[in-house]
Image: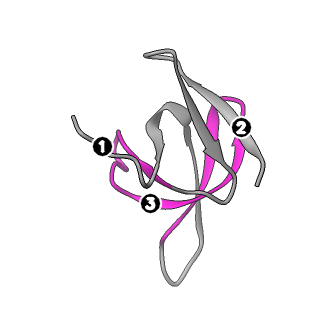
Amino acid sequence: MSEQKLYDSSDQVALRLQLDQRVRVNRGTLEGLSGVLVGIRGDRCLIKLDAKPRAVVLLIDAAAVLPREANLTK
């Protein structure tokens, strides 16, 4: 898997995300949805959402995405 380094512009915190990694949207209208990271374009992530029976790909701000295993305590 290739590793990409992304920066959360709000906190300047480096997030490490890998292609084919399971991720979850952690803010915004689509908060709570999960899927697989399939691409990175600048500061945006392409996520293949878990939607059956059709495939859905979401282009979203990278700052709104965390690895699925991460604890999301607010």
Please give the name of the residue rendered at 60% of the width and 37% of the height, measured from the top-left corner: 16
> Image quadrant of residue 68?
bottom left
* Image quadrant containing the C terminus: top left
Residue at the disc numbered 2: 4
User: Is residue 66 inside the magenta stretch?
Assistant: no
Label 3 element class: strand
Which of discs 3 and 2 lies nearer the camera? The answer is: 2
Of callouts 1 and 2, the N-terminal one: 2
Quarter of the image holding residue 47?
bottom right
Q: Which residue is mark 3?
A: 34
Task: Specify whether 69 is left or right of 16.
Answer: left
Q: Residue furthest right?
A: 2
Identity, as a three-letter code, of the amino acid under mark 1: Leu
Query: What segment carries the magenta color?
Result: 23-50
Secondary structure at badge 1 equals: loop
Is label 1 in contact with label 2 (beta carbons under 8 Å)? no
Marks 1/2: CA distance? 21 Å
**Between discs 3 and 1, the one toward the N terminus:** 3
Label 3 and label 1: CA atoms lie apart by: 13 Å
Q: CA distance from mark 3 to mark 2?
A: 19 Å
Residues 67 and 54: in front is 67
Among numbered discs 3 and 2, the one appearing first in the sequence: 2
Q: Residue at x 33, y 54 (%)?
A: 32
Which amino acid type corresponds to the residue marked 3 in the rendered image?
A: Ser
The circle drawn on residue 26 is: none
Residue 72 shows which numbered tag? Answer: 1
At a point 55% along the width and 35% down the height, the residue shown is: 62
Query: Where, quadrant-wise, is the N terminus in this rendering?
Result: bottom right
